[in-house]
């Protein structure tokens, strides 16, 4: 029966063939594991590596992160996307200090009570750091389990998700948890990332392909079943770039909630007319320079961005909710990736 040997096969495979080189592996430091888990949500390993190292240089402990300013945290996260993760990361660090004396709790329930830590992330921390018998169920693991089990229920349903959670817990190791739980959890992650991929999985390299229902069916790509599709939308944003003679740019913090909440950004307008009407109060719109519009793709929305640069001779305050920022200050600001790129390349 698959339950009796599944975890043993995953542990044995991970020991020999799994990933062992990543900087957040081979540690039981809950802060480092937690930080990597949050960064890896919806983000590829190759992208996370540089951010992870820079974050640890500035905030090597949870106490350092809790003590950092909002601006510092957002600047460190700038370009990594999904910025609610950064805000929750900062809140979580503060709660770990206040509620748990600076030490991450050991149980899934307590970990899940912290901001930004869901059940799967809590399971990963509990498994890796505290050898708890805790399941994870991120996208990679869902793919592995639904294929191996031939799980055909629609994961758009909460009932199906709950059922898969129960099956995931049934498959967990039961012996030598201190060794096997971290290896099993890492093995499931590695399997989904390198072997049981969404397209063209390498089934013959999989240690459990002999027990895999999807492999026997010859249809691994039909799993997991999820019918609910994200509804995409589009918006056009006109970006106003007021620029002083010394190169300083006027930047404002984006409101919360909303896209890029808490980040510094060029003022945003719904139309060119609205942008020019506001600009006419502070600069000569006849000198406006329209840059080439470009597309920025978010998870649920396509942003069509239209940058307009208008020189401003005075050192006035165009709006009460922003500040002048010289080019030397830009690297230390929390800026959305497309805004940072736009400023760096100039227009």
Image (cartoon, helix red, strand yellow):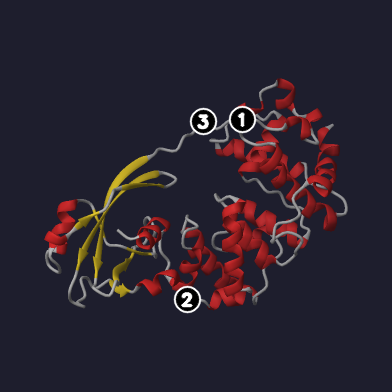
Q: Work out whether mark 2 precedes mark 3 in sequence or the reverse, and give the earlier one.
A: 2
x 53%, y 35%: residue? 156
Figure check: 116 above or below 60: above
Query: SS class of the residue under badge 2?
Result: loop
Residue identifier under label 2:
69
Q: Is residue 165 visible?
A: no
* Residue 160 percent coordinates (x, y): 60, 35
Q: Between residue 310 and residue 106, name the one nearer to us.
A: 310
**Residue 227: assigned label:** 3
Taking the image as shown, residue 152 lies to the left or right of residue 3, namely left
Depth check, mark 2 against mark 1: the one in front is 2
Figure check: 334 above or below 2: below
Query: SS class of the residue under badge 3?
Result: loop
Q: Work out whether mark 1 precedes mark 3 in sequence or the reverse, and give the earlier one.
A: 1
Q: Between residue 260 and residue 289, name the one nearer to us.
A: 289
Residue identifier under label 1:
153
Query: SS class of the residue under badge 1?
Result: loop
Real-space CA distance between mark 2 and mark 1, rounded to the nearest whole angstrom: 45 Å
x 36%, y 71%: residue? 327
* Residue 22 percent coordinates (x, y): 70, 57
Label 3 crowding class (10 Å Cα cut-off): few <14, some 14-19, many 20+?
few
Is there CB contact under 8 Å for labels 2 and 1?
Answer: no
**Residue 345: assigned label:** none
* Residue 336 percent coordinates (x, y): 41, 59
């Amino acid at each position: 029966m698959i339950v009796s040997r599944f975890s043993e096969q995953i542990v044995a495979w991970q020991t020999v063939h799994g990933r062992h080189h990543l900087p957040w592996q081979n540690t039981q430091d809950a802060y480092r594991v937690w930080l990597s888990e949050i960064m890896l949500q919806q983000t590829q390993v190759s992208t996370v590596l540089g951010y992870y190292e820079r974050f640890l240089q500035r905030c090597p402990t949870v106490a350092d992160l809790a003590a950092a300013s909002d601006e510092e945290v957002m600047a460190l996260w700038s370009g990594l996307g999904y910025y609610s993760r950064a805000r929750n990361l900062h809140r979580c660090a503060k709660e770990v200090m206040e509620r748990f004396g600076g030490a991450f709790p050991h149980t899934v329930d307590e970990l899940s009570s912290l901001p930004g830590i869901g059940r799967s992330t809590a399971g990963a921390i509990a498994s890796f750091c505290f050898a708890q018998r805790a399941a994870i169920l991120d996208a990679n693991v869902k793919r592995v389990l639904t294929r191996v089990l031939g799980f055909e229920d629609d994961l758009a349903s909460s009932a199906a998700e709950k059922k898969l959670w129960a099956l995931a817990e049934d498959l967990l190791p039961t012996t030598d948890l201190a060794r096997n739980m971290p290896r099993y959890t890492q093995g499931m992650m590695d399997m989904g990332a390198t072997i049981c991929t969404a397209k063209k999985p390498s089934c013959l390299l999989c240690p459990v392909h002999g027990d895999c229902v999807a492999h026997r069916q010859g249809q691994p790509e039909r799993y997991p079943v999820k019918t609910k599709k994200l509804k995409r939308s589009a918006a056009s944003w006109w970006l106003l770039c007021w620029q002083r003679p010394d190169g300083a740019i006027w930047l404002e913090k984006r409101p919360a909630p909303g896209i890029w909440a808490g980040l510094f950004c060029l003022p945003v307008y719904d139309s060119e007319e609205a942008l020019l009407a506001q600009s006419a109060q502070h600069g000569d719109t006849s000198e406006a320079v329209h840059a080439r519009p470009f597309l920025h793709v978010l998870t649920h929305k396509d942003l069509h961005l239209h940058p307009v640069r208008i020189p401003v001779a005075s050192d006035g305050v165009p709006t009460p909710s922003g500040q002048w920022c010289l080019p030397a200050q830009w690297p230390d600001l929390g800026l959305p990736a497309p805004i940072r790129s736009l400023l760096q390349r100039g227009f």
